[in-house]
Structures are given as structure tokens and as C-alpha cells.
Amino acid sequence: MIAAARGGEAAEAVDRLPVARSAQVRRAWVRLVRMDGRAFAGVLALNGLAAAAGLAAPWLLGRIVDEVRAGAGLATVDRLALAILVCALAQIVLSRYAGLAGHRFGERTLARIREEFADRALALPATTVERAGTGDLITRGTTDVAAVGATLRDAGPTMAIAAVQATFVLAAVFVLSPLLGACGVAGLAGIWFATRWYLRRAVTAYLAEGRANAALAEELAATTSGARTVAALRLEHRRLSACRRAIEECRRTRVRTLFLRSVLFPVVDVSYAIPVAAVLLLGGVLMAQGAVTLGTVVAAALYLRQLSAPLNTILENLELLQSSSASFARVEGLAQAPRGGPAGAAPEPVDDRIEVRGASYAYDAGPDVLHGVDLRVRPGERLAIVGPSGAGKTTLGRLLAGMDAPRTGEVTVGGVPVAGLDPDRLRERVMLVTQEHHVFLGTVRDNLAIAAPDATDAHLRAALDAVGADWAVDLDTHLGPGGHRPDGAQAQQLALARVVLADPHTLILDEATALLDPRTARHTERALAAVLAGRTVIAIAHRLQTARDADRVAVMRDGRLTELGTHEELVAAGGAYAALWHSWHGDPTSGPPAPPPGPAVES
Ligand SMILES: Nc1ncnc2c1ncn2[C@@H]1O[C@H](COP(=O)(O)OP(=O)(O)OP(=O)(O)O)[C@@H](O)[C@H]1O
């Protein structure tokens, strides 16, 4: 149900991860080029040489025309023709090496982009990913990075070569005759205007297309991950229409980008003939006045004809460049996303004490769901947090585990904000265990090594033993498709084994054993109790049994801590907890549950 509901919100959710602005994208490109500056300079130099070699042919052809008109013999023509051949060969060789250097530069830069993306994605706070939806993040990490990669690998180097060639060719026409050069450039005005028209619309259009693709990915991911719920609640029609809407949006945005191309390319095709025709016309007039030779006009016309090849290459790749710019803006946008973990080097906690002081918290820009919570957890105690659904137990658990920082107030371990600790140091101190357990593709060993990369096999087996995971004794058992597929209880046991290995002094259990069948749950709880003896355990409890067994019970209601004390104290106090306890026991003297008492009793 949650998956289906989240899928329905996908369209709004997809934009929550930031997208970099044009200036930021430009700065990012400059930074990436600078990181491999020498290679980039080499690419430009080789392209320049290749383009210079390519200029020789039209100029030599012009020379042949003039020499023949001046009565030169066959030997002169042969000499010039041989020079054309040598230049053509040099151009082929230089272009090949220019391409190779370009591809190498592109691959290295792409690898950097991928690494940066992975670092940034891993640094995102869990809440940001949850709110944005994994579909957006996955689309950025796959489709968008692949689009950027295609540009860097192929379109980028190809366009660099073409741009250098076009510049050299135009410069050559100016050198031959500035007047013919100016005429040729003026003839290119049609291409200039058409391209400007296209570029002004293309970024927005491609960004919209990227958003639509991400929304579709989000819808599909939500539908497939919640397939059972969708089937059970007969939500197929709603899911189908949501997917159809997303597909229709993809189609609409794609049609828009296709329309832009369908205007650009025909205009450009026609425009290529204009500068050539203009140069021939003006060249005829200038020749009649004796200002230029026929060879010069021929060479200029050939150059401008030659210009169509690099310009075509640039324009053909412009679409890819536009879409990959939009993709890069989405990839680079992650740099603007809030980062989880510490802003700088956090000081070392002085002890294991956990304290919450005046903590309030709100999801996004919503209202506060925690209000001024004060709580001091005693090292080594077992604290149960109870309260009705929506009271804020899980939210408080997330703050205690350092997954989110409070909006106001403080949540500290050993005097240091929990959310400020880097993940490795945090894991050694506080760990949150919830019902959601991810099994990573790989072996049992891989799944456990996440928590303790240096642990020996004996340690890993001892941890599995502690949580009763006797099904996983073979550490090389492959988990996931094609191997053993752990059920919910086994996945939870793996997560608990990771906790045992990480050995934190404080453990926050959010219904950690809820998915286990009662026999396994008892077994796991017993095992955990043995392993965690002497450590602090904060259990978000849905069963009053858990609360009764705890050293102290914290009662929450409407985001406030309303009662705090031992089970006996709270029962004797006759407040909301007592009423709950009596009604759970079916105590006829208890009467209806009492209204909750006021804010925090004691901490
Ligand atoms: N991701 C979220 N975005 C927005 N609001 C949220 C989010 N998660 C929880 N809330 C809201 O915060 C409040 C506290 O929720 P929380 O899950 O912490 O309560 P809880 O006591 O753990 O409830 P339950 O026992 O049902 O899990 C509720 O009003 C809930 O709707």
C-alpha cells in the first residue's frame, strides 16, 4: 500500500533531488577538464594538426587551377597532387590519434563522474532518498550517466574535431580572400538563427524529457516492488492508469524534442548551399574586376562546401550534447543535495551517554512531528518507547540513530551530536535495527563484512550463531537470484548478525523482531539479550510485554514524551500507560484508558 501510494506521488517526488543550473554545469565541466588538463590540451593540439592537414587539399586544388591556367605542365600538377595525397594521409593519421586521445580523455572523465556520483549518492541522507524516490536516483545513476558517457566517449571528441575543422576552414577562406570569407560567413546566417532557435528551447525540452523518464521509472519501480499489495488490494487499474499517464508524459516530451529537431535539420540542409552560391556569385564579380583568381574562387567554394561536413557533425551531435547537458545537470545536481553525516571533523564522544534535549523535528516543510523532547538514556539500560501509531516513536528512533538531525534542540552521544558522526564512527556507537532489511547480492560473508570488513570467519560464524542463523553456516552461500533467497526472518537475522559484528554500545530496535515467527523471535531476542548484555538498548515497542521487561518505559503521544519511568512506577501513577496496561490485561477495574498526561514528566 505504501509502495502504491508513494508511486502515486511520483510525479511530485521526482524533482526533489536538485538539478544543477547552467552556470553550475559549466563550472563542473571546467573543473573536470582541469583535472585532466594536459590530456585535454593534447586532444586539442592533435585535432588542430589534423584540421590543418585537411586544409591543404582545397588550397592545393586552387593552386592546380591557377597553375594550369598559367600554362604549367604535367609535372607541376603531379607535384601538387602528390602534396594533396600526403596531406590527406597526414590528416587520416592525425585524426586517428586525436580520436584516440579524445576517447581516453572521455573515459577517464566519465570514470570521475561515476565515482563522484557514487560518493554523492552514498552521502545523501536516507530521508532525502526516501522523499525523492529511488527511481529518480536510479535514473540519474544509469540513464543520465550513460548519456553523459556517450557524449564524452563519442559526441564530445567528434564535436571537438569538427569544431576545430570548421574554424580552420573558415579562417582559410578569410586568408584566401577576406571579402569571400565575409560573404561565406554571411551565408551561414540561416544556420546560425536556426541553431539559436533550437538551443533556446532544447535544454528545457530535454530536461522535461529526463523528468518524464524518471517519473516513469519511479511508477514502474513502485508498482513492481508493491506488486503483491497492488494485487491484494486490486489496485491494478489505478497503477495502470498511473503508468499510462507517465508513459503519455514521456511521449509528449519526446514529441517536443523531435519537433525541435524536425525544424532544425531541414533548415540547416538548405542553408549549406547558400554560402557556396554566394561565394561563387561574388567570386565571379571579383574575378571580372581582377581582384581574385579563378583558383582562389574554386578554393573558397571548395572550403565552404567542405564546411558542411564538420557543421553537420556538430549539429547532429548537438542533440546528444543538449540531452547530455540536461543529464549532466541532473547528475551534477546531487552536489547541491543535502549531505548526510558530518559537516567537518566531529569531536570524539567522551562517553556512551545518549541525551535528547528539547528536540523537535519536521519532515520537509511540514509541521513538527516531535515537540521539545527531553530524554536522558542511562548507559546499559533497556528503555522501551511506547505510544499510539503516529506518536513519533520511529522519528525519535531515527534521531537517536543519527539518521536525521533535530530541527531544534540536540541529540548527542557522549556530548557530540549523533547526526554529526561519520558513518563508521556512528556504527561503532549507535545502530538502528528496523523491520526493513536489505540483503545485498553476494555471499553471506559479503553481507556480513559490511559491518566488520576485518572480521575473521570465526567471528562471522559466532555472530550468525548468536542470532540463531544456523541456515547460513556456509559463509560462501550466494544470496539472491540464482542462490539462496532469504525470507524476511532470515534477512532480519543477517541484519542482527551485522549488529553483533559492529558491536555498538547502543542499539535502537524499531520492531526489530516483528517479522520473525514467535519461536524464532524469542530465540533471536534471547540471543540478542545475551550478546547485548551491559549495552544500552532502546526498543520501540509495540508489545507491552517488551515494555514490562524494560528497565524504563517512555510513553509518547502526539510527538511529545508524556510519561517516563519504570513499568511499576507508571502503572502506579495511573496515567495513560497504566490504562493501556490494564486494558491489555483485561483488568475490569481499570475503566476506559485515561487521557494522556501533560508534557515530559521526567528525564
Ligand atoms: N517520511 C515521512 N514524511 C512525512 N511525515 C512522516 C514521515 N514519517 C512519519 N511521518 C509523520 O510523523 C509522525 C510520526 O510518525 P512516526 O512514524 O514517527 O510515528 P510512530 O509512533 O513510529 O508510528 P507507528 O507506530 O505507526 O510506526 C506521523 O504523523 C507521521 O505521519
Image (cartoon, rainbow, N blue to C red):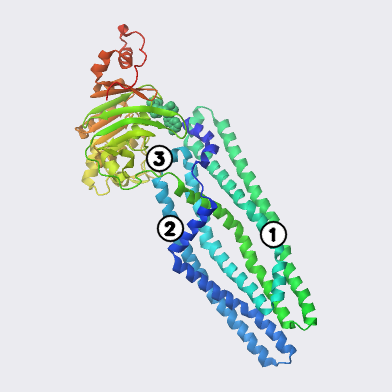
Residue where numbered disc 1 is placed: 193
Q: Give ligand 1's quarter of the image.
A: top left
Q: Nearer the viewer, mark 3 or mark 1?
A: 1
Residue at x-position 46% and y-position 60% = 32
Q: Nearer the viewer, residue 125 or 85?
A: 125
User: Residue 584 location, x and y as percent?
Assistant: 32, 15
Q: Is residue 106 above or below residue 300?
A: above
Q: Which residue is painted at 76% across and 71% down in the image?
A: 278
Q: Residues within 10 Å of mark 3 (few under 14, many from 20)?
A: some
Task: Specify which label sits upstream in the sequence, 2 or 3.
Answer: 2
Q: Position of residue 96 (x, y in %)?
A: 53, 72
Q: Is residue 551 above or below residue 74?
A: above
Q: Characterize the local packing of mark 1: few (<14), some (14-19) or many (20 or more) Cα atoms within 10 angstroms.
A: some
Can residue 444 be seen by looking at this rendering? no
Under circle 2, the secondary element is: helix
Q: Nearer the viewer, mark 2 or mark 1?
A: 1
Q: Is residue 296 above or below residue 588?
A: below
Ligand 1 within 8 Å of disc 1? The answer is no
Residue at numbered disc 3: 126
Q: Badge 2: how crowded within 10 Å, few (<14), some, or many (20+)?
A: some
Residue 597 falls left or right of residue 306 = left
Cα–Cα span, label 2 and label 1: 36 Å
Residue shown at 70%/72% (left/top)? 182
Quarter of the picture holding the C terminus:
top left
In the drawing, does residue 401 fall left or right of residue 139? left
Q: Position of residue 312 (x, y in %)?
A: 65, 64
Q: CA distance from mark 3 to mark 1?
A: 47 Å
